[in-house]
Amino acid sequence: MVDAAPSIVEARRAAFATHPLHRALGISLLDSGPGFSRVAIAASATTMGGVGGSVHGGLLACLVDIAMLEAIIPTLDPAMDQAAGTADLSITYMRPALGNQIVADARVIKKGRQLAVVEIEIRDEQDRLCAKGRTLYAIRPRK
């Protein structure tokens, strides 16, 4: 992995806090760096709607995608890599995501020239595994 300059990570954090989707859904960036991230979604009237009053499963999939981006983007080399977007996203739900805050931890498993594999675990406040995500992120080489 390429080490991101602190300025890249800090710029991502600043942009994250002002993103309209993140603000609307109560998603916060708890930690990030090249190859990892931790994001959280706050339970609210907007995010509830799943089984037994849990955070809606579609929003958990959204959380997977957001956590993946925050883990992979700092690993890209601006001179060689160009972000191309999510190529594949899968999520396995294991239990309802209940509690005031649901946390997603992402880590880059492998970054190649054209694809990166990222795995994400979503846990509730009792640290119970609620869902697992796996994503492929497309990378275009700069010409």
Image (cartoon, rainbow, N blue to C red):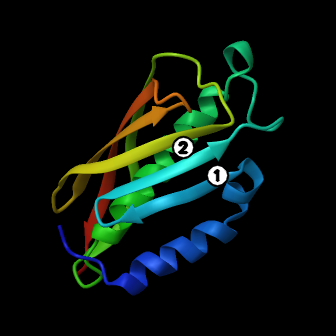
Residue type at mark 2 is Leu
Residue closer to the observer: 119 or 28: 28
Instruction: Quarter of the image for the N terminus: give it.
Output: bottom left
Residue closer to the observer: 22 or 76: 22
- Residue drawn at x 56%, y 34% as measured from the top left: 60
How many neighbours does mark 1 have within 10 angstroms: few (below 14), some (14-19), or many (20 or more)? many
- In front of the other: label 2 or label 1? 1
Q: Is residue 11 left or right of residue 143?
A: right
Q: Is residue 107 left or right of residue 133?
A: left
Q: Tag 2's secondary structure?
A: helix
- Residue drawn at x 52%, y 58% as measured from the top left: 30
Q: Which residue is mark 1?
A: 27
Furthest residue toward top? 52
- Image coordinates for residue 31, horizontal then vertical, percent: 45, 61
Q: Which residue is mark 2?
A: 63
- Image coordinates for residue 76, horizontal then vertical, percent: 28, 71
- Residue drawn at x 41%, y 86% as measured from the top left: 7
Q: Is residue 48 above or below residue 76?
A: above
Residue closer to the observer: 17 or 143: 17
Disc 2 versus disc 1: distance between alpha carbons? 8 Å
Q: Is residue 80 above or below residue 38?
A: below
Q: Is residue 81 above or below residue 59?
A: below
Residue type at mark 1 is Ile
- Image coordinates for residue 83, horizontal then vertical, percent: 37, 67
Whether tag 2 and tag 1 are in contact, CB under 8 A, the answer is: yes
Q: Tag 1's secondary structure?
A: strand
Q: Earlier in the sequence, mark 2 or mark 1?
A: 1
Q: Is residue 61 left or right of residue 107?
A: right
- Residue drawn at x 75%, y 29% as measured from the top left: 48
Instruction: Quarter of the image for the C terminus: give it.
Output: bottom left
Furthest residue toward front? 126
